[in-house]
Amino acid sequence: MKPIQQMEPLSPTAFERLRNNNIIQAWLVLILTLCFGSSLAGIQMTLGPKIEENKLNETLEKIPELILGAEGAQKLTESGEKLDVIPRSFVVDKPGKKAVYNVYEAFDKDKKRLGWVVKTGGQGYADRIELLLGVDPEVKTVSGIFVLEQKETPGLGNKITFEEWRGQFKGKNTETPMGVVKGGKAGAGDINAITGATISSRAVTDIVNMAVADLKGPLTANAEGGK
Amino acid sequence: MADQPTAAERFIQGILPENPVYRQLLGLCPTLAVTNGLKAAITMSAAVLFVLFCANVIVSLIRNLLKPHLRIVIFTLTIATFVTFADRFLAAYVYQMSKVLGPYIPLIIVNCLIICRCEVCASKQGVVTAGADAIGQSLGFCLALCSIAAVRELLGTGMLFDIRVLPVVWPDWVIMVLPPGAFLTFGLLLGLVNWYSDRRAAAAGGK
Amino acid sequence: MAKEIQIRESAEAPVIHVAPSPHLSHTAQTTRTMMRDVLIALAPVTGMALYVFQAYALRQLAICVIGCLAAEWIFTGMRGRRATLWDFSAAVTGVILALSLPGTAPWYIGVIASFTAIGIGKVIFGGLGMNIFNPAMVGRAFVMIAFAGAMGAAGYQDASSAVDAISQATPMDAFKQGGAIAPLSALFWGNTNGSLGETSAIACLIGGLYLCIRRTASWEIPAGVIGAVVVLGGIANLLNPESQWTVLHHILGGALLFGAFFIATDPVTSPLTPKGKLIFGTGVGALIMLLRIFSGYPEGVMFAVLIMNSITPLINRWTIPRPLGGK
């Protein structure tokens, strides 16, 4: 059966046609969009730089501690001095892909290079772990690590952020990759795993090992050639 | 319009009798996600207060210009704008907290609580009533979030507002700061609220 | 007043057992006799736990059984029901819960687990017969996540213990984290470390076979679990032939047999029909292997049982027996 045909609508007047036009109906939406859009742009322009600064500061604040250690950083703040930090980025060719590292180069007031801070990350137990890794100018020893972001299990894996655990990395030799040992019996080149969170411990150690292996060449070459 | 609640009624209703979380079961996403600490819960509530208040006032101002089939677009547009304000503002001035809350601030856009208040109250009533309604509902939301967060933070970490309340020997119930803890706490508190209001209703009926 | 009478009536009304046909074979079975059978079947496991872990086992059993009975009494009291202590179901939950915890876990873990098991696992759903999830496993999952430190690797090890077994890592842990292989005989007899009830394969087998012969537990579920583990363990072995953790290790190690015979067979939370039970068992076994091989946890019995519990209603719906002559 054929559906019932709709009746031809009466031909609308020009004014009515204009009123029923989709664009005209949406005049309020359009005006609001304009107002809101411009105010958002204004907000972004005023607050944008501050947000960027916050993000950068989070990294920069940690650099003295990672290079000089907690006490050294304390002294530095007391003396009112600041480290000169130059952000750089290194591209490392790896089989199949290129890895880009953001590296911060730290100098003291006499332009003597104190060390490097590398921003790196990798897969943890729950989610990506982002961390900062400090090394000495010749990339011989690790001067400290700091965990920027992690979502490891509270009470177990999130102990990677604790000073007692991450402090272990300080002073470790970078000649050979660090291993992870359970039960608190770590040797000189090893890291003690967190009880019940071996995977998180291993993830952080692997990230550090990987960054050191990738950047050792470029950084030392830069250190020699850059003088 | 005569049977619409007044501003004072709207305000009172939002806090307990029509509590957005415990009574209307609206806005459960942040309720479950950001209640692992009191600080996060209060920041979240403040952001909701700001967004809801602004959205309610704007919608109430333009309520006579709204076309029925375009109103949802306008609500969403208004809400999204103020949510972005709140998000940028937090990122600029309380950066750490904005990192903790993560995607849940932008997700206020899809919080049904706000669009519900725009629809139910702001698009029908005057600015004062809409504003009072927004504040009342936000206080109710804050109350609900804080009640859940207090239980979770206390049991999960032994702290309130990041300050240790329970002795150090307290074994942290880690599950409480994880998502399952949110569901359990919310379910039990919701049951408690229902049980209590049932009893009150029974007592009132018996008189 | 009227409400009160109604509740009392419903509490005293005869319990109508709903079961698939044939309806004549199980007439003598009541909740109480079933639970008594389970307790008898748990005796060898409990005995083994007491032998290996001694005071630790005794303490944990006492805490969990008393905790579960107290929780049952309090929570059923709150719901205005007659306390159901004497059908032994709470006691069985307590014993299974205790046997699934490590002996060295602190006292509050047993108490919290018991109250969660009975309160959130059972009474909140309406009491015995209404619960979706195995109560003992709900309790264990809660404390497992809440106190991972005291329940996981560290909980099993206590260097100052007089019993030699407690100072070792559990066989599953040692394998997952260090690649160490426990001897099969140790897994079979049970002088290794682990949760109280899971160490001895022989004790689980004796108790489990008793349950199956008494028809208190249906043989389909353990058969499904073990079958799936054998098949998947075999595949894993073939793919990775140099691994020393063989199919037999998979079966005898960890909580597999304990879970297959005592936890998965809970009549309330497993499907009704034999076909459904077989599906359920196979699912549990497959999930156990999945979790053991790919997850961060060394053992997956608890999560496997809980996940399969949640789809039990679905399995029941799939396997409705067709009546004679029906289409």
Image (spheres, coloured by chain):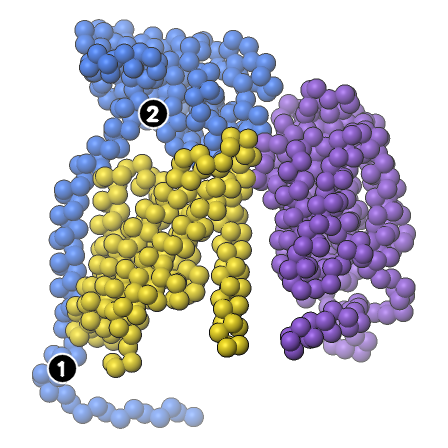
Chain colours: A blue, B yellow, C purple
The residue at 22%/55% (across/down) is B81
Location of residue A186 in the rendering, given as x and y in whole percent from the top left corner: 56, 13
* Near-viewer residue (A107 or B18): B18
Query: Disc 1: which chain?
Result: A
Q: Residues within 10 Å of mark 2 (few under 14, many from 20)?
A: many
Amino acid type of the residue that numbered disc 1 sits on in the rendered structure? Arg
The residue at 79%/46% (across/down) is C261
The residue at 63%/48% (across/down) is C116
In this view, C19 is above or below B47 = below
Residue receiving disc 1 = A17
In this view, C254 is above or below B46 = above
Q: Taking the image as drawn, is residue C180 in sight?
A: no
The residue at 24%/59% (across/down) is B53
| SS class, disc 2 | strand
Residue A119 bears which disc, if any? 2
Q: Are marks 1 and 2 on the same chain?
A: yes
Q: Taking the image as drawn, is residue C327 in sight?
A: yes
Quadrant assignment, res A56? top left
Quadrant assignment, res C171? top right
Question: Which numbered disc flags the more N-terminal residue, 1 or 2?
Answer: 1
Tell whether C16 sits left or right of C174.
right
Q: Nearer the viewer, mark 1 or mark 2?
A: 2
Tell whether C50 sits left or right of A119.
right
